[in-house]
Amino acid sequence: MAELTYRQAVAAALAQEMARDDRVVLLGEDVGSGGVFKTTGGLRERFGADRVWDTPISEQAIAGAAMGAAMAGLRPVAEIMFADFYATCWDQVANEIAKVRYMTGGQVSLPLVLRGANGSGGLGFGSQHGQSVENWAMTVPGLKIASPAGPAEAFGLLAAAIRDDDPVMVFEHKALYGRKEVVPDGEHVLPLGQARIVRPGADVTLVGLSITVGTCVAAAAELAADGIEAEVIDLRTLVPLDVAAVLGSVARTGRLVVVEENPGQLGWGASVAAIAAQEAFGSLAAPVTRVSGGNVPLPVAASLEAEVDVSVPRVIGAVRGVLGASRPVVRS
Amino acid sequence: MGVPDDLELFTQMCFLRHFEERADSLYRQGLIHGPVHLGLGQEAVAVGAASVLRADDYSLGTYRGHAHALARGAPADAVLAELLGRQGGICGGKGGSMHITSVEHGYYGSYAIVGAHLPIACGLAWASLIRRTGQVTVCFFGDGTTNIGAFHEAVNLAAVWRLPVVFVCENNWYMEYTPIGDVIPVALPAADRAAAYGLARIVVDGNDVSAVRQVVGDAVHAARDGAGPSLIEAQTYRLKGHSAADGAAYRPAEEVARWRERDPLLLARATLVADGTAGEKLDEIDTRIKGDLADLARQVLARPVPDPAGAWADVWSDGSWQWRN
C-alpha cells in the first residue's frame, strides 16, 4: 500500500491507463512539463511526445481537438487548467461534446475525459479561478461528472473515466492536491455512479462531494462528541447519480443535509434535495436542508472568502437545525 | 478510386442542385420541421473537394451541409428522411437538416454553431497524425466563421502541430444577411488571415469544379505528405437566402444576376459542350435526376414517422439515457 498525494494519484491513474491502452493521449496547457498543478509530471518522459501534447492557451481548440480525436477512436484526456475556464470553451463542452452522439443518432461515441482544478477551498483564487462549477455541467444532459474527495477516489474515478465510452468531466479539487492518503496497490478503478458511505450514523445523513466530504466528516466528528451520529455519503459522481445510496441512508436516518461547494442557486444539491423530497417524503422527519457556497462571486480576502465558503460550523449549524425541526414520523 | 471525368462531376453537381431544389420545395410546403439552409450555387466546392478524397478521409461541414454529406456518398433517401422527419433518417430524426452526418462515408458531421467544428477537425487530424494513417481531414465553413474565436484557435493549433487538415472557407460573401465586407478589416475573409498563421494565401474560383479539384487536391496531397495544414478560400455565391425562410432581398439584383451567369452548373456545362458533349445529353441527365428526386421525396414522405421511443436512445454509448438510479 503506497501513500500518494491527490496530485500524485492523478498522475498515477493517467500512467496506469496510458500503459494499459495506447489510445490514451493527453493534451493541455503545460502538461508536457507536468502542468501548473503538477498532475502530469513524468508522463511525457515515460510515454513520449506522441502521447503528451502541449497546447497553446486555446481552450476551444483543446476541447474540440479532444472531441475530434475521440470520434476517430482515441481516448484523449484534456486538461482544462482551472475549471472556471470551461466558460471559454463551453460551446465545445455543452453544445458539441454533450450532444453530437445523440444528434447523429449514435453514429459516434466520445470516449474522452475533460479534467481540471475546481473549487475554492479557501486558497484565495477568487471569482475567476476559485469557483466550483460542477453544477454548470450538471445542467447539460450527455455529460458524466466525477469529483473525487481524496487520493484513492482521484485515482480510481479518473481511471474509470478514461475507460468509460462516454465523455466524463472530472472536477479535481485544487485545495486537495496536497492531501495524502493510502491508495490500494495494483490496478485501481472505481465504478462511476456508486456513492460510498464514508462514515455510518443513525441520526442524520450528510451528503457531500469532493472537498465537502471532508467538511462533512469533520462536522460528524464534532457532532459525535455531543452524541449525534451523522452518516456521511460521498456521491463521487453527479452523473450518474447514486440516488439509491442517498435514499437508503435517509430511510435509516430520517434527516438529510446536502453539502455542496457550488453556489446554492441551482447547485447540484437542489436536485438531490428535490429527489429526496419527492421519493423519500415518508421517511423524512425534518425538512431537507442545504449548505452551499454563497450566492455571490467568490471574494479573495481570507475573511470574506470564509464568510461564503462551506465550513464545518455551517454544516454543524444545519444539522442542529434539522434535529431541532424534527417531527415524529411513522416508519413503515 | 477512379478519377472522375467532367461528366461525372457535372452529374454529381446536378444531383446536389435538384436535391436542394426539392428540399426548398418541401420546406415551402411546410413538410420540413425546423430550419433548412440550402447550398444552392455552392455545389462545385462540395463535389470538387469530395472528388479528391480517399474513402477513409474525414470531412466536416456546417448547417449548410446537405451537399457535403451527399458528395461523400451519404444516401439521399436517408438524408431526405432526416429532413422530413420520417423513419430511416440518417440521424434517426435527432439531428435534422443542420446536423446531417454520415460517419460511414467519412462525413463526420454538420455543425450549426459557427466555427465549432474547426477545433473538432483538428482533433480528427490529430488522431491521424498520431496513428500515421495518412488520412486527411477537410473542414468546410462559411466566410462569417473567420470572425469567431474558434476559427483562430483551430487554425493556429493546426499550424503549430502541423496537422493534416485542409480548411476550406466557402466565401459566399454574406454573413447571414450582412455583406462580409462590412464586418472584416481585410479584403478577403480567409485568404487575408492565412499569413497570421504562417499559411499560404490561397484563393480559388469556388464555382469552377475543376479549379476546386485542383487546388483542394494539391492541399490534400500536401497534408497527406506531412506538409501540414492549408487554408483555402473558395469564392462562391448562394443562389438563395441564408435559410430557406430568407428571401435575400438585401442583395443587389445586378450582383445576383452577375453570379447567376457564373452558376457552377452553367460553367461545367459550357466546358462539357466545348469538349464535344451534346447539350441534349446533359439535359437528359438533368431531367432524369430531377424526376428521380421527386419520386424519392414521395417515397420518403410515405414512410411512417419515427417511433417516439427513439427520443430516449443514443445519449450514452450503451444506448441508454438515464442519469440516475
Image (spheres, grey):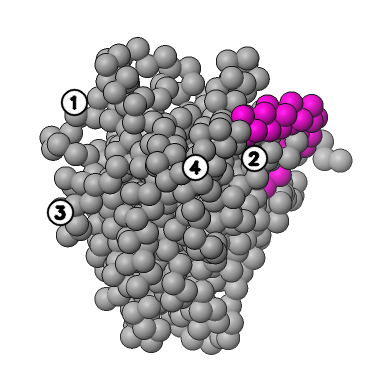
Which residue is labeled 2 in the image?
A: B76
Q: Residue at x 54, y 42 (%)?
A: B11
Chain name for mark 4: B
Q: Residue furthest right?
A: A332
The magenta span reads: B286-315
Which residue is labeled 3 in the image?
A: B195
Main SS of the magenta part reads helix
Residue A212 showing in the rendered view: no
Discs 1, 3: same chain: yes
Discs 4, 3: same chain: yes
Discs 4, 2: same chain: yes
Position of B255 compared to B120: left or right? left
Which residue is labeled 1 in the image?
A: B182
Chain name for mark 1: B
Residue A125, image x and y in percent? 25, 52
Category of crowding for the residue at label 1, using alpha-carbon neighbours closer than 10 angstroms: few (below 14), some (14–19), many (at least 20): few
Eyeballing the image, is A271 above or below A316?
above
